[in-house]
Image: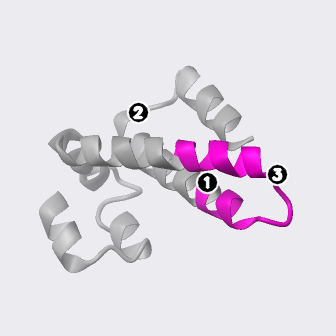
Amino acid sequence: QSLKDATEFFSSNLPNISAVIPAMDQLDKNFAVGILNNHILSAPLRHAISIGKRTINKYYELSDSSDIYSISMVLHPSYKTTYFTRLNWSDSWINEAL
């Protein structure tokens, strides 16, 4: 459901660059929970989720190499730096993003 929601959101007229990191964070969180649900999900599904998590991590690394994501987050009136502090980013990560 998370992937469907993200696809529909980014296919709408509303998305902007500042929505990318929060969407990736939510997908990453959902993938992590899915991997831990050993008693609910089958092994092939957990394996597929782990591949999705690796893919998200790859895109996190790519977003680190572009300033546009952090700039858009800091300039967004709803996020600014509170988004990063709410997710318990270390001060060094926040300073690097700035």
| Element carrying mark 3 | loop
Are there few (<14), some (14-19), or many (20+) residues within 10 Å of tag 2?
A: few
13 in relation to 76, above or below = above
| Residue 37 shown left or right of residue 8 in the figure | right
Q: CA distance from mark 2 to mark 3?
A: 35 Å
Q: Quadrant of the C terminus?
A: bottom left
Q: Is residue 36 above or below residue 70?
A: below
Query: Does label 2 or label 1 sit earlier along the sequence?
Result: 2
* Location of mark 3 (residue): 42
Q: Report, in whole angstroms, how far the alpha carbon at label 2 lies from the one at label 1.
A: 23 Å
Which residue is at a point 36% across and 41% down the rendered structure image?
59
Residue located beneath label 2 in the image: 16
Residue at the spot x=40%, y=33% of the render? Answer: 16
Location of mark 1 (residue): 31
Q: Locate residue 12 relative to residue 97 in the image: left or right.
A: right
Q: Hey, what amino acid is under mark 1?
A: Phe
* Magenta stretch, overall SS: helix
The crowd level at tag 3 (other Cα within 10 Å; few <14, some 14-19, many 20+) is few
* Relative to 5, 93 lies left or right: left
Residue 8 image position (x, y, % from top left): 64, 27
- Residue ranking furthest to the right: 40
Task: Pinpoint residue 47: horizontal percent, then vertical percent.
Answer: 65, 47
For the residue pair 56 and 22, the one nearer the viewer reads as 56
Q: Which mark is residue 11?
A: none
Q: Position of residue 15 (x, y in %)?
A: 48, 31
Colour mode of the rendering: one colour
- The part of the chain drawn in magenta is 31-52
